[in-house]
Amino acid sequence: MTSKMTSTSAANALVTFINASPTAWHAVHNASALLEKAGFKRVEEGSNWEKDLEGGSKVFYTRNQSTLLAFTVPKAGFKPGTGVSAVATHTDSPNLRVRPVSKRSKVGYLQGMDLSRSCASGNLADFEIDQVGVETYGGERFMNIADKTVFSSPGIWHSWFDRDLSLAGRVVVANQSSASTKDSRTIDSHKFTSKLIKINRPILRIPTLAIHLDRSVNDNFKFNNETEFIPILGQISAQLDGKRAKQVEKMGDSSDDDDKFQTGGSVVANNHHLGLLDLLAEELGVSVDAIQDFELATYDTQPSCLGGLNNEFIFSPRLDNLMSTFSAVEAIIRSSSQSSLQELEGNINAIVCFNHEEVGSVSSTGAESSMLPNFLSRLSPTPSEHATTISRSFLISADVGHAVHPNYTAKHEENHRPVMNGGIALKTNAKQKYTTDAWGSFLIRKLVERKGGNVQEFSSRNDMPCGSTVGPMLSKIGVRTVDVGMTILSMHSCRETGGAHDVQSYIDLFQAFFEGFATLDKDLQVI
């Protein structure tokens, strides 16, 4: 049984991780830092890392900055055919993505980023509101085979109104001399670099319409997410138009000179407001013309925090699914640091943190990518060895679930109403939206018993669509799989609510899995 002190410490560590991880790129970066601090060795996925594995090895690699795979080798070493005990999570969450051409404007405001008009100074009409053109991220489409009804699980977009938003993501920059950077570090030989960025102040907002202009808003709040869901960035006078025109002209002046960084194709400055580019350049410590392209997402600047009468809750963005990702990282670090574990023979322990789960997982970094299959194949390259590895492996698909809502208890099946801080929830669905079967649930119960925790059950109502996870698609590899998750309220909202004590319970489950699955599996007979 975990103590309150331990639970609070784990919850605070999760809060710190979430606040530093507004995007999947940041989540992988911060998870990588935790792993490296714990003695894990970073390797390139494409390198021949297999030849260097030995007993006690702790290794990880990333793909496209947004997916991570880490694993440990038992002290006794491994041979082809060794099983893998893996926890799979995802690093992404619903948000708003800045469009490739984001400049938009409205009279009186700066909408997405357009200063193409020129106004005479001195009048109110001299100002335009710049808005950032955005695209919603989140909403995999499903089809109910029975009645052909299509439904999706997008973000709760209305929760993004009237929030203090900012931008974070990654920016491709042309490397410049160290003298032009903030930290004056020596730049490597690569000509272009992808840099993470997190603007730590509110710069965007999606304002609601005043009730005086929409008297029915409390009865039925509806909006068009293309035309009425556009963040405002600022209010800039027409004098900046001249500055922008000059800089765009300069940046668009092609030259073979090495000092010119904008080369070929369209100039990024033509697609975005100069004020945004200036801000990005200032944050990164580079010149505007060094910016080649970027991927940016909105995030809520209100920090994640503990709350409730006794700090029993976590009020936070991105609990789905950084709660699972952080817990998996922490568990493999803790299990790898235990000297007793290093003496054990058994499976390779692994975590795989995928991107793009919220949009269907179909990408080079999603769960339907080659990430996990390639890993298993490289450990056991021959068909017979690979088959043996598959038969000895087990995967926990970890994604947060739905706690029963006190105001909407009827939305849950009456005998399946998990609560926050009530322990791990086993997710079961007869239509295989979740992969849990009797053997999987039996295993989870036995592992939870080792740490003195609790197990809850979740199964959707027959008249309500069921969500899904990375579990079903990964199970197609042939690995035994079970779906679990700690439960939260307001899933896919800009702000979600979770249980503070559930973080340590999550870590306990994964750690028990890494330390005890191989032994427990010897007592199972599944033909």
Image (tube, rainbow, N blue to C red):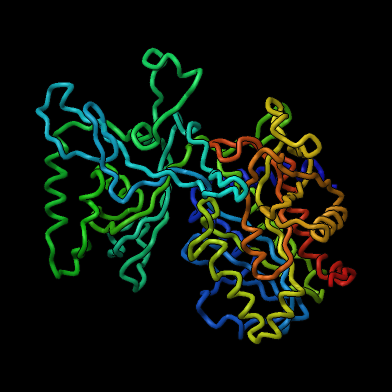
Q: Residue at x 38, y 12 (%)?
A: 212
Give the position of the C terminus as an image quadrant. bottom right
- Place of residue 158 in the rendered image (x, y in percent of width and height, measured from the top left): 48, 31
Taking depth in this image into account, of 174 and 403 the one nearest to the observer is 403
The residue sitting at the left extreme is: 120
2 with respect to 57 (left or right)? right
Question: Could you tell whether 496 is left or right of 192 in the image?
Answer: right
Rendered view: 319 above or below 328? above
Picture coordinates of residue 388, whole percent (x, y): 74, 80
Q: Above or below — where is 448 with respect to 340?
A: above
Labels in figure, total = 0
Front residue of 226 and 348: 226
- Does the rendering let one see residue 443? yes
For the point 76% across and 64% down, the residue is 514
Place of residue 267 in the rendered image (x, y in percent of width and height, measured from the top left): 21, 56
Residue 336 visible: no
Give the percent coordinates (x, y) of residue 508.
77, 53
In this rendering, is residue 162 above or below 165? above
Q: Name the one closer to the observer, 412 or 106.
A: 412
**In this orientation, which residue lies closer to the viewer: 336 or 489?**
489
Residue at 70% x, 84% y is 385
Q: Is residue 155 above or below residue 266?
A: above
The part of the image, by quadrant, that contains residue 111 is: top left
Q: Residue furthest front?
A: 147
